[in-house]
Image (cartoon, grey):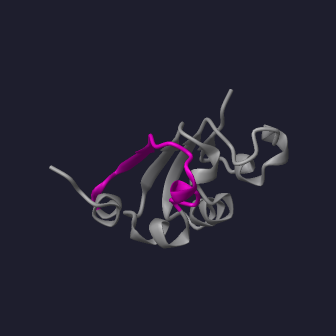
Amino acid sequence: SYTDLPDLLRAADVVSLHVPGHAQNVGLIGADQFSLMKPGAVLVNTARGNLVDLAALLDVLQTGRLRAAGLDVLPEESLLRDEAEVFRSPNVTPKA
């Protein structure tokens, strides 16, 4: 059965993104979506970097609302792991 994104975010312990980076998906997960997620949930993004608002992600990681994030992609692929502030968070597993 189909579940819409807000309901999925409210129910899931782990959210793993697997959607194309089309214009309608840019910023798919931002502050509003993070506010719907369960406290302690985990976000995994191996799809496209432009799907997640990194500033909003960093905020929910620092406040402890999200337990962890696994990121294999960045909004700008030229952005190095050492240059992205989100990767300084101890609860982020960066791309290799």
Q: Measuring from the top left, give residue 22's x and y in whole percent.
A: 55, 49
Using residue 8 as the reference point, say whether residue 32 is left or right of it.
Answer: right
Check the image and report above or below for 20 versus 35.
Answer: above
Q: Among all residues in the image, which is located at the extreme left?
A: 1
Name the residue at 53% across, 49% down: 68
Foreground of the two, 74 or 68: 74
Using residue 52 as the reference point, say whether residue 16 is left or right of it.
Answer: left
Using residue 3 as the reference point, say whether residue 53 is left or right of it.
Answer: right
Q: Among all residues in the image, which is located at the extreme top?
A: 96
Name the residue at 42% across, 57% down: 40
Magenta span includes 23: yes
Q: Among all residues in the image, which is located at the extreme front?
A: 23
Check the image and report above or below for 23 versus 71.
Answer: below
Foreground of the two, 16 or 26: 26
Q: Measuring from the top left, give residue 17's x and y in whole percent.
A: 46, 44
Magenta span includes 52: no
Check the image and report above or below for 4 versus 14.
Answer: below
Residue 38 location, quadrant: bottom left
How many numbered discs sit on the rendered protein?
A: 0
Q: Quadrant of the C terminus?
A: top right
Name the residue at 63% across, 51% down: 50
Foreground of the two, 14 or 79: 79
Using residue 90 as the reference point, say whether residue 65 is left or right of it.
Answer: left
Q: Measuring from the top left, give residue 71's x and y in whole percent.
A: 60, 40
Name the residue at 64% across, 39% down: 73
The span picked out in magenta is: 11-29
Q: Measuring from the top left, give residue 57's x and y in whole percent.
A: 60, 60
Residue 81 location, quadrant: top right
